[in-house]
Structures are given as C-alpha cells and as structure tokens.
Image (cartoon, grey):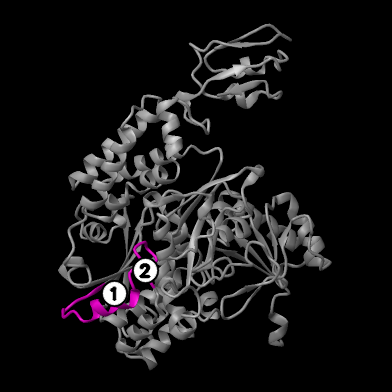
C-alpha cells in the first residue's frame, strides 16, 4: 500500500486538560468514535487527546485538522453535526467554531486573524494542545529530544552554559535570576555528586501554568532537565510536584517511563557516555515549599522550612551537594534555546527580559485561561486584546500580578509593560505568572485580606516577623471589613508591612505584605471609607451592607421565599419589608428580585 494512503484524512483533537476533562472530554471522545464508525470514517480519522490549549472558558474544545478549526463549548449532541458537516461534507460548523485557520510554524509564532492567539507567542507552551502528551512519538515528531541529541553530540557542558547565558533567559519562578548564571555557579562547584531539581510546586491561588505545561507536554521538561544535568555534571534529577495534581503526575510518570525505555533517560543516554535519571517527589501542598531551600528540606524528608542564604543551593543544596533548581517554565524553554539558538531567543522580549512569559489569566475577564506573550507586552494588550476585556460592560478596577505576594495595579498602569523591571517599578512583581483581573465590583480591602489570609495561613512559622506580623496585619484588615476599623489602622498596616518585608527570612514573608501595601498605595480612599464612614464602596463586605425594599416592589414574594432567616414580610401584591435586626446581609433577596426593587447600600 502507498504510504500516503495510510495518512488520516482528518485529525480530530480533544483538549483533555482539567477544565475540558471536567466538561466530559472522555464522553465526547466516545461519542465521536461511535459517530465515525457509523459513517465509515473511523479508519481514516485520527482521534487525539491533548493537553490544555489555553482557552479554558471555551471548554470543552474540539479541533479539526486540516484547517485548524477550533470548536468550543461542544456537547455530545453537537458531534453528529460536526462529523456530518465538517468531516463528510468538508464544511466547518460556523455556529460552534471559535476561530479558523491559525498556523503554527517552527519559530512558534501564531499567525492568522485570531483574537485569542494573535498576540501570543508560544515557546514554553509550543506543543500544548497540539500533541498527545502521553505519546513519545508525538513529541519526537515535533523536534522532541533533538536538542538533547545536539548537546550530547556537538556541545561541551561549557558551551551549553554559554548558550543559556547568552540567551538572557531569567528564571520564570518569580525572582527572575539569570538562568545561565545559576547554571554556571552550580557547574563550577567541586563535588562528587550534584543534583537537578524541577520546582513544580505551584501553589499560587488561580495559577496553573506549570501544571498545564506538564499535563500538555511532559517530555519538554524532562528534556530540559537532562540538558541541565549534562551542563553542570549531575546524574540525578527530581521533579518536586504537589500531590493535588494527579493528571500531571500520571502523565509525567508515563513520560519518564517512556524516555527510559527508549534510552533517553538512564545510563548511556543515546549511546553516549552521559547518564541521568529522574525521580518524582510529591509535596503535601505547603505553599512555602515553593521556596527552594524549603523544597530541598521536603525532598530530604524533613519539614519544609526555609533556611538563611548563603550558602545558596548551587553551593550547598540537596543532601549538602551543589543543586540546580529551576521551575517548569524555565526548563521548557531550554530545548528551544539549544535548537534555535540564543541569538534568535534574544530577539524576543525587552532589553533585560528576554523571551516570553506564560500567564494564568483569571478573574473578571472574558477569556480566562493560559496565555503566553513576548516580554514587553502591556497589561492592556493582555487583558483587552487577548483576554477580551471585562464582562458585562463593567469597568476595569485593578489587576494583580505575581500571585498572593504580588501587587494590585489600577487603571493608570494598564500600559505597563510586562517585564521584571517595569512591574517592579509599578509596585508589583512578575512572580510565577498569576494574573487576576478585577472589575468595579471588587472591594480592594477585601481582596487584600483574602491574599493575606492565604499567606498568613501558609507561613511556616519559623521567623517571628512573618508568623506574628502577618497575623497582626490580618486582624486589622478583619476589623476594617467588619466596620470596626479605627483611626491609625492604615498607618499600622504600613508600618507592619514595611517591617515584615525587611525582616522576614524567606521570600514568602518578604513579599506577603505586597497586596496590602499596593492597595493602600493605589486605593487608600477605599480603606478610609471603610474606617471613617463604615461603608464598603464596592458593596461586597457583608458586615457593612444593608438591604432596603423600595417602592418598586410589586409584592411577588420571591424575596421572602429566598430569605434563609425569615427577615422579609409582606402581603401579596404589597410592598414587602426587611427586618434589619434579623437580616444577615446574605444578599439572596437582592439576587432574586426581578424588578430591581431592592437597594443595596
């Protein structure tokens, strides 16, 4: 048989990331298989499950190739129409298609008139959503392990480090330390044993960049780690990943097993003299274990608590040996830099921040999901051009970058470029890549309290400034949101925040006050309104709310039925009344009223 005749006429890809999986991607797969068999197309159609494409708000996603037609929000009832119209008649189903005809070339740039992808440039996420993450063959077909082969055959360890240094790649885990410099520092250490670690302990609220990268393309992380091990002279690596990520763990384990079986991991890799293997270590979900010294303690079987530095892990890390630690996104960039060269990589981004950055775009924005953009892209471009803007015609209020330790930036900072220096100058940080958008309905005092609750709860308790200082700050914020704030509370928050930032042992404590300090800087009037007038301008602090039924009430009784404490009374077709003493300010009456007859103040 002619080889060309064995190629599938169509390739149907189903996103099998957590969001799409939650929306029954496996069910869709079974329905598609059944429909293909009915129409005699099963043998000529390739059906693939992929990782996250990034368009999480459009799940579940189905992609048909050739043509790269993306269908969103697909239900089992839609499948017969897609098969009949698209696969049989060759006509995409317009009512389900999100975008059509976007191309992917070897330089990872997305082309085409596609709103979501048009301003993205996918390097770390280059294979996510377009390959089967559980297939080594798929990864090999996308230049997988070519970088490793190049390194083992054509480059010395010093040349690899030189190329990474030349690329200007900075660690994507938060601090932005130069990756090549960290590699060089570790390589120059004299030791009988060295280690490589992938930090996949992603614990920021609303962040899922590293998890999705592993779920969608686990081999790229493995390949990057092997190259790192070769460069510094290490033969053992560890992926530290939290146990709450079962899909990522399963796919990573399978990828490691496949790589070992094919001679890409273990002894004499690709018939070379170099040996390297990888183990998975599961974390229990402690946020502080994202800090590299706490992570090392956890791998060693000790309590995950940070220690003072120096010595740095590159000098004295895992079991006292020199250790190279990078996060998932950093490792995912390494094969690209080796293959396409540092000169090409440095053409992307800004003068001091090279390459791209992956963000988990969440909150009050139309297009939630994963995005990857060149460094230097503005917040406005990410939120409005890629994210589609704020839903329901509401006004933008703030965006928080950098996770629970980041800052909240108001509208006047929307044209800030996304790079390490620009975000820091604006009063925030890059962090690992969380980006939460907030509209006019969000109370900034309450949001500061939310993030401080998280960091205070996650404090390991080792140092007093973090353990006790964040607790005192949280107590003040709790009083303010309950209407019990007093004059001087704002100044106390500022003093405590500054002290904690300067005196805490590790990055968790040093950055924990950031959400409070940044909201005080940009939204001070909102704090003052809570304290002086006992009023929440956004109308979200429950203890400061009150509900009143106006003359617009038609006496339908729906509010009375919804009230969980029986605080509403009234006769049919007559204006109802809320007993303020009994009201618990839950807002169910306000949400239920169809006549806008309940006023919230």
| Dominant SS type (magenta) | loop
Residue bearing the label numbered 2 = 171
User: In the rendered image of this protein, does residue 482 appear above or below residue 183?
Assistant: above
Identify which residue is drawn at 56% across, 59% down. 382
Residue in the foreground of this view, choosing between 257 and 386? 386
**Rendering quarter of residue 9:** bottom right
- Alpha-carbon span between mark 2 and mark 1: 9 Å
Q: Nearer the viewer, residue 473 or 325?
A: 473
Q: Quadrant of the C terminus?
A: top right
Q: Residue 467 location, x and y as percent?
A: 23, 42
Q: Is residue 173 magenta?
A: yes
Q: In x, y percent, where is residue 441? A: 55, 37
User: Which stretch appears magenta?
Assistant: 170-195
The local secondary structure at tag 2 comes to loop
Say if residue 355 shows up in the picture: yes
Residue 493 relative to residue 210: left or right: left
Front residue of this view, candidates 248 and 503? 503
Labels 2 & 1 near each other (Cβ < 8 A) = yes
Mark seen at residue 182: 1
Give how far across and how far down residue 292 sits, in percent: 27, 61
Give yes or no for residue 430 being in the magenta stretch. Answer: no
Residue at left offset 37%, top offset 63%:
173
């Amino acid at each position: 048989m002619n080889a060309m005749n064995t190629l599938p006429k169509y390739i149907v890809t189903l996103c099998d990331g957590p969001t799409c999986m939650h929306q029954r991607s496996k069910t869709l797969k079974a329905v598609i298989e059944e429909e293909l068999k009915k129409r005699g197309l099963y043998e000529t159609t390739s059906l693939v499950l992929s990782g996250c494409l990034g368009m999480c708000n459009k799940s579940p996603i189905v992609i048909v190739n050739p043509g790269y037609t993306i269908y969103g929000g697909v239900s089992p009832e839609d499948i017969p129409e897609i098969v009949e119209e698209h696969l049989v008649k060759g006509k995409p189903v317009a009512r389900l298609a999100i975008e059509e005809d976007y191309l992917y070339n070897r330089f990872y740039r997305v082309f085409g008139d596609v709103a979501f992808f048009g301003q993205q440039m996918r390097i770390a996420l280059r294979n996510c959503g377009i390959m089967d993450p559980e297939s080594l063959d798929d990864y090999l077909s996308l230049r997988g392990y070519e970088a490793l082969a190049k390194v083992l055959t054509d480059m010395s360890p010093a040349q690899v480090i030189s190329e990474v240094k030349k690329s200007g790649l900075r660690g994507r885990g938060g601090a932005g330390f130069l990756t090549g410099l960290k590699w060089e520092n570790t390589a120059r250490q004299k030791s009988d044993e060295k280690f490589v670690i992938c930090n996949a302990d992603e614990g920021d609220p609303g962040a899922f960049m590293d998890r999705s990268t592993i779920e969608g393309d686990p081999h790229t992380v493995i390949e990057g780690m092997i190259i790192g091990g070769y460069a510094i002279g290490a033969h053992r690596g560890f992926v530290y990943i939290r146990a709450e990520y079962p899909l990522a763990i399963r796919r990573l384990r399978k990828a490691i097993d496949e790589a070992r079986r094919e001679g890409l991991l273990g002894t004499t890799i690709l018939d070379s003299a170099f040996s390297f293997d990888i183990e998975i270590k599961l974390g229990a979900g402690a946020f502080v274990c994202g800090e590299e010294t706490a992570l090392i303690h956890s791998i060693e079987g000790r309590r995950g608590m940070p220690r003072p530095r120096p010595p740095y892990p590159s000098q004295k890390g895992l079991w006292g040996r020199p250790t190279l630690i990078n996060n998932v996104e950093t490792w995912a960039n390494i094969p690209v830099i080796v293959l396409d060269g540092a000169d090409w990589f440095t053409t992307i981004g800004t003068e001091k921040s090279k390459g791209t950055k992956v963000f988990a775009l969440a909150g009050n924005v139309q297009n939630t999901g994963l995005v990857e953009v060149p460094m230097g892209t503005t917040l406005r471009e990410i939120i409005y051009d890629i994210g589609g803007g704020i839903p329901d015609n509401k006004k933008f209020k703030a965006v928080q970058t950098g996770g629970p330790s980041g800052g909240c930036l108001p509208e006047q900072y929307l044209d800030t470029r996304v790079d390490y220096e620009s975000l820091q100058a604006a009063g925030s940080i890059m962090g690992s890549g969380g980006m939460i958008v907030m509209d006019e309905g969000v109370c900034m005092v309450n949001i500061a309290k939310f993030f401080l609750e998280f960091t205070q709860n996650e404090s390991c308790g080792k140092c007093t400034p973090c353990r006790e200082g964040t607790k005192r700050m949280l107590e003040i914020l709790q009083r303010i949101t309950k209407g019990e704030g007093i004059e001087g509370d704002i100044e106390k928050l500022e003093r405590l925040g500054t002290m904690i930032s300067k005196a805490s042992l590790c990055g968790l404590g040093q950055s924990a006050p950031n959400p409070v300090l940044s909201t005080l800087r940009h939204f001070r009037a909102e704090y003052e309104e809570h304290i002086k007038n006992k009023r929440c301008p956004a109308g979200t602090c429950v203890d400061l709310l009150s509900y009143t039924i106006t003359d617009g009430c038609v006496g339908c009784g729906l509010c009375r039925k919804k009230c969980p404490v029986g605080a509403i009374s009234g006769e049919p077709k007559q204006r109802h009344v809320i007993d303020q003493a009994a009201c618990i300010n839950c807002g169910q009456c306000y949400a239920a009223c169809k006549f806008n007859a309940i006023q919230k103040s």
